[in-house]
Amino acid sequence: MNYKIGTRGSKLALAQADLVRTRLQEAYPEDTFELKVIRTKGDQLKDVPLGKIGDKGIFVREIEEQILEGKIQLGVHSMKDMPSQPALGLVFAKAWKREDARDVLILRKEKSLSDLPEGAVIGTGSMRRKFQLLAMRRNIQIVDIRGNVDTRLKKMQEQKLDGIVLAAAGLKRLGMEQIITQYFEADEMIPAPAQGILALELQSANERLLSMLNTLADEETEKKAIAEREFLKEMGGGCHVPVGAYCERSTEGALRLHAIYGNESGSWLKRVSVTGQEPGQLAKKAARQIEMERKAFENGFNGKA
C-alpha cells in the first residue's frame, strides 16, 4: 500500500518527516511511503509572536484536514507544537524514541550565558524560554524572534543579537549541533512539554497504520510524553503563558516530573518537581502544587488573607 506523509515545508519539518518515512520503509518494505508538503497558517504568520496568536493549531490544522479528507494518511509534527488534544477523528501513535530534549544557546561571540555583558540581547519567540533566561540573568534583554532555524540564525546576524535560544533536537536532526555554544540541562531550563518527540498523527479508524507505527514505539518515551502532555492539558495548554515540563527517571527508578508555569507578565513563575510511578497522576500532582501556589500568589497580590 502507498502511504502519503504530510509535513510542513521547512528544512527541519522535512528532515523529521524523512526520518519517519525512512524508518517506516525499512520496517515495512512491502509498502511505499512518500512525503507531501503542506503549507499551514503558522507558516504564513512568520513575524507574529506566538503569545499574541495563542493557538498552537496554526501549525497543524491544514495537515489535520488533509488526514481527515484522506488526501494523506499520516502527519508528522513536533509534539511540542501540538495542542493538548488531537482533532476529532484523529489520534496520535505512541511516541518513538526521543531526541535530545534540552534547549541550547547559540552565541555570536561569548562562550556561555554567564559570559554575556550586562544589557546583552538574546532572541527567542518563547515566553517559557524568556522568563527562565531572565531568572538566570536579570541584566540581559530578550527580544522576540520567530521563524525556522535558518531564519532565526539570519536574524541573529542581521539584528546583531548576542545570541538566540533553540531546541537541541532540531539542530541535531539538521546535523547542525556544531553551532551550539551551551546546553541548558533540562532541570535548569525546563523544556516545552514533549520537546524532542515527534507527533505521528493519523485517523483513529486507520488501525493498520496505527499498529505499524506503534510497533516502532519506545515505551519509555511514551510514558514521559504522557506525563508532560497531561501536565500541559491540566494547565490549559496554549502559547499565551510560560509552561514547561520534563520527565526523567530518578536514580531510584521512579518517574520524576520537572514542571514550570507562570503568568503572562512573568511576575510569577513557579517550578516544581514531583516523583511517582504513574504518568497521569504525576502530571495531576504537579498541576495541583502549582495551582495552590498560583492562588496563594493571587490572594496575596489582591490583599486577601
Image (cartoon, grey):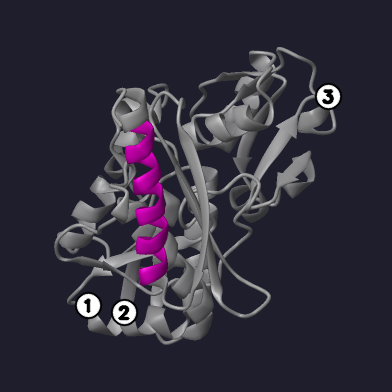
Instruction: State the residue position of label 1.
Output: 206
The residue lying at 51 percent from left, 52 percent from top is: 272
Q: Residues within 10 Å of mark 2 (few under 14, many from 20)?
A: some
- Cα distance between the residues tagged 1 and 3: 51 Å
User: Which picture quadrant has residue 86?
Assistant: bottom left
Q: Amino acid at mark 3?
A: Lys
Q: Which mark is residue 109?
A: 3
Q: Amino acid at mark 1?
A: Asn
Quadrant location of the C terminus?
Answer: top left
Magenta residues span 281-298
**Can you tell which of label 1 and label 3 is closer to the viewer?**
3
Provide residue 132's location: percent of width, then percent of height.
Answer: 58, 35
Q: Identify the element where label 3 is drawn.
A: loop
Secondary structure mostly taken by the magenta-highlighted segment of the chain: helix
* Closer-to-camera residue (54/176): 54
- Cα distance between the residues tagged 2 and 3: 48 Å
- Cα distance between the residues tagged 2 and 1: 6 Å
Instruction: State the residue position of label 2.
Output: 209
Instruction: Judge from the rendering whether residue 271 lies leftward or rightward of residue 163; answer left or right.
Output: left
- Please indicate, yes or no, whether residue 77 appears anywhere in the rendered image: no
Quadrant location of the N terminus?
Answer: bottom left
The residue lying at 36 percent from left, 24 percent from top is: 301
Provide residue 262's location: percent of width, then percent of height.
Answer: 43, 36
Instruction: Judge from the rendering whether residue 112 lies leftward or rightward of residue 297; answer left or right.
Output: right
The residue lying at 53 percent from left, 72 percent from top is: 255
Q: Amino acid at mark 2?
A: Leu
The residue lying at 47 percent from left, 32 percent from top is: 127
Q: Identify the element where label 1 is drawn.
A: loop
